[in-house]
Image: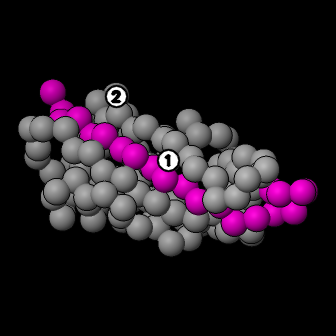
Amino acid sequence: MDMIMIRILFLLLTVFSLKLSAQETAQNTSNKSMPGGLNSFRAEVAKQIDLSDFVWNEPFNLVVTFVVSKDGKMENVKLEESSGNTEFDQRILDGIKRIRKKKWTPAKRNEEPVESFYRLPMTFHPPK
């Protein structure tokens, strides 16, 4: 990786604030998780989103939702709340969709895997 890409990635990881929250679709379920935990997921999302040629001056907020299937697959990635900028929204969705191949540990109810819902609010601050 060349030095410019390393600097861009570092800038994105330090400037870009990503907040995660999960909402279960069923009661009495165990937590689903990404291999390496939520910090690993956050870092992976940051790596997959290319904002290198995107210029903005104000923070962008958006919310993405997805389902973790009984098999641990990330499915139905959708934009719940737009940032107000279609190009920005699409870049975020494309980045998240690139990590769909990673398996999650599915949530369980009564020791049986169940489908679960994730709601991912994100805030992106402009580079300084």
Residue at 46% over, 67% down: 77
> Would you say residue 111 sits in the magenta stretch?
yes
Residue 118: x and y, percent? 55, 55
Side of 115 where 127 appears, left or right = left
Instruction: Look at mark 2 in the image and give the residue it sits on.
Output: 14
The rendered magenta stretch, by its main secondary structure, is classed as: strand
* Residue 2 percent location from the top left of the image: 32, 43
- Residue at image x 36%, y 64%? 79
**Residue 84, which numbered label?**
none
Q: For residue 44, which numbered disc appears in the image?
A: 1
CA distance for labels 2 and 1: 14 Å
Segment tinted magenta in the rendering: 108-128
- Residue 103 percent coordinates (x, y): 68, 60
Q: Is residue 8 visible?
A: no
**Residue at the farthest bottom position:** 76
- The quadrant in which the N terminus is found is top left
Q: Amino acid at mark 1?
A: Glu
Query: Residue at (81%, 56%) from the top-left corner?
Result: 108
Question: Count of labels shown?
Answer: 2
Label 2 environment density (alpha carbons within 10 Å; few <14, some 14–19, many ≥20) = few
Q: Secondary structure at mark 2?
A: helix
Give SS at disc 1. Answer: helix
As drawn, is 62 to the left or to the right of 57? right
In primary-sequence order, the first of circles 2 and 1 is: 2
Given the image, on which type of amino acid does mark 2 rest? Thr
Q: What residue sits 15% from the left and 51% below the top? A: 54
Is there any visible trace of residue 107 in the rendered image? Answer: yes
Splitting the image into 4 quarters, where does residue 4 fall?
top left
| Side of 127 relative to 44 (left or right) | left
